[in-house]
Image (cartoon, coloured by chain):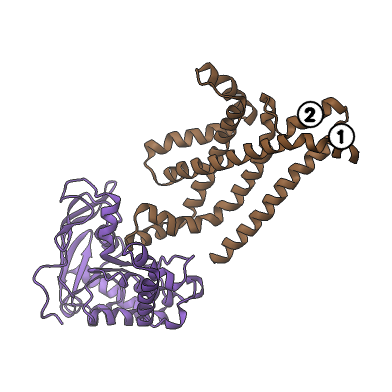
Chain colours: A brown, B purple
């Protein structure tokens, strides 16, 4: 069994890098987009908040696999040429953005409105109020659910194998196709996913502790 | 203290009307605050006192009228234009109006020193060292020289409110708004906060203050305004307004307040 695992490892390396790339791009893109749209949802007028609300609720209500196939088959039909890799990444990022929007909005609205007023009263502009007053406090509410969503992204990235992207999952299946030994390979795959997410959990607990220390309740 | 004030008022409010839905909260308020004047606003809850202060600091929009700080229209580009000023212009105007809040509203993630220094650094563009020196000066002024590094959560209510005052005054505002700043405090902590305000008044700070502390209004206020149903019902020197109320409304209000504070 150990032999089978050691044999497989070199063949999994490229797939592992693809899994990390998919996860990294999805996490970064969804964080950037979710922050912007979450802030707009929290502070903006209703007419611009409503479409954001509809988007966030829709992508979160659709099974991820349906979303991936919709983008994979749908966009080329609309004359938008996308490689399987970018189609899958776009679908995952849209899905995650929906979650991040909701997390950002929740974290921001947990801050007492008096904080915004006090920040106004010392002459801070909107962006300065966000950077110096709202975000440093909201980050405590933001971090725990967001880290959850990051580990979800890593796990969810396995779905890109369904549209033919050779990620860690797909690489595992390719090796199984040659060796006909599924168990060692799936156990190895599980161990790799666990290692990545365990590293993320440790990092997140450090982060949470740091922010909890700087902001007393 | 009343002598030697500038003829032109620092703050001038004309025909201010503010509605929440169908309720008219401010129903045509006219008010001037002279330089160095301590104007005390009293009135029952719901009479529009706090809303008046929030309009003056452009925290809420209003429906009609004009508010000017040293001649500059606040909140809107022109009186009754309905065109709200942009974010940056509002921020610049607010920087010249200090505000102290009933619930303190200190920034919980910043120490006392950082609370006071934030506006100096970001809004006034001071280097950190200079901003913190100024913050320390004002914290010492309000008697908190030994609490500079405390987070608000490690301060008593009275200490928090004194940081709130230091944060507002350090910006060297042209006008200081005080919104029931002692209402959330334990009775034995009220004195230390009011003493700080007295000191500021002696130094000539122009103040518009909403309070239920009638003793303070009497001996520290230059003028008292009694608000009732969104209008100014009575105004004049404290001794006159509080000692010889003309309307039944004010007599009833003062009786209720006296009963509460005795």
Please say whether residue B182 is visible from this viewpoint. no
Q: Position of residue A171 (x, y in %)?
A: 75, 31
Lateral position of residue B196 relative to residue A56, left or right: left
Foreground mark, 1 or 2?
A: 2
Q: Residue at x 88, y 27 (%)?
A: A180
Q: Nearer the viewer, residue B193 or A203?
A: A203
Q: Nearer the viewer, residue A157 or B54?
A: A157
Between the C-alphas of marks 1 and 2, the distance is: 11 Å
Q: Check the image and report above or below for A91 versus A32.
A: above
Q: Position of residue A201 (x, y in %)?
A: 68, 52
Callout 2: residue from which chain?
Answer: A
Q: Position of residue A87 (x, y in %)?
A: 58, 27
Dot 1 corresponds to which residue?
A: A183
Dot 2 corresponds to which residue?
A: A173
Which quarter of the rendering shows the N terminus of chain A? top right
Q: Check the image and report above or below for B64 versus A18.
A: below
Q: Nearer the viewer, residue A40 or A68?
A: A68
Please say whether residue B141 is visible from this viewpoint. yes
């Amino acid at each position: 069994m150990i032999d089978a695992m050691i044999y497989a490892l070199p063949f999994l390396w490229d797939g592992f890098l693809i899994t990390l790339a998919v996860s990294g791009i999805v996490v970064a893109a969804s964080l950037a987009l979710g922050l912007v749209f979450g802030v707009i949802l929290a502070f903006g007028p209703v007419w611009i908040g409503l479409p954001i609300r509809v988007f966030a609720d829709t992508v979160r209500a659709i099974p991820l696999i349906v979303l991936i196939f919709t983008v994979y088959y749908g966009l080329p039909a609309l004359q938008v040429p996308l490689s399987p890799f970018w189609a899958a990444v776009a679908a995952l990022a849209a899905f995650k953005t929906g979650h991040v929007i909701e997390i950002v909005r929740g974290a921001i609205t947990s801050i007492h409105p008096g904080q915004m007023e006090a920040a106004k009263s010392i002459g801070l502009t909107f962006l300065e109020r966000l950077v110096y007053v709202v975000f440093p406090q909201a980050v405590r509410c933001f971090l725990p659910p967001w880290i959850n969503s990051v580990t979800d992204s890593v796990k969810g990235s396995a779905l890109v194998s369904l549209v033919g992207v050779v990620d860690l999952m797909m690489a595992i299946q390719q090796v199984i196709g040659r060796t006909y030994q599924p168990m060692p390979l799936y156990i190895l795959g599980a161990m790799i996913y666990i290692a990545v997410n365990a590293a993320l959990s440790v990092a997140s607990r450090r982060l949470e502790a740091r922010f909890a220390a700087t902001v007393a309740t | 203290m009343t002598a030697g004030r500038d003829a032109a008022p620092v703050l001038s409010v004309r025909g201010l009307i503010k509605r929440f839905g169908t309720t008219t909260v401010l129903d045509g308020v006219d008010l001037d605050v002279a330089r160095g004047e301590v104007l005390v606003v009293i009135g029952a809850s719901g009479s529009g006192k706090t809303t008046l202060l929030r309009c003056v600091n452009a925290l809420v929009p209003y429906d009609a009228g004009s508010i000017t700080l040293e001649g500059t229209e606040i909140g809107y580009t022109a009186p009754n234009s309905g065109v709200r000023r942009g974010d940056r212009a509002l921020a610049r105007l607010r920087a010249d109006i200090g505000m102290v809040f009933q619930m303190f509203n200190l920034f919980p993630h910043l120490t006392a020193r950082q609370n006071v220094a934030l506006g100096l650094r970001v809004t006034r563009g001071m280097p950190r060292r200079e901003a913190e020196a100024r913050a320390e000066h004002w914290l010492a002024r309000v008697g908190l020289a030994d609490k500079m590094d405390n987070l608000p959560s490690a301060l008593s209510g009275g200490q928090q409110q004194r940081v709130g005052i230091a944060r507002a005054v350090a910006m060297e505002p042209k006008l200081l708004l005080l919104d029931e700043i002692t209402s959330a405090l334990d009775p034995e902590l009220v004195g230390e906060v009011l003493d700080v305000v007295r000191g500021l008044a002696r130094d000539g700070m122009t103040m518009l203050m909403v309070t239920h502390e009638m003793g303070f209004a009497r001996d520290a206020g230059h003028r008292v305004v009694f608000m009732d149903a969104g209008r100014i019902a009575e105004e004049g020197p404290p001794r006159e307004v509080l000692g010889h109320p003309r309307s039944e409304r004010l007599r009833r209000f003062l009786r209720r307040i006296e009963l509460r504070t005795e």
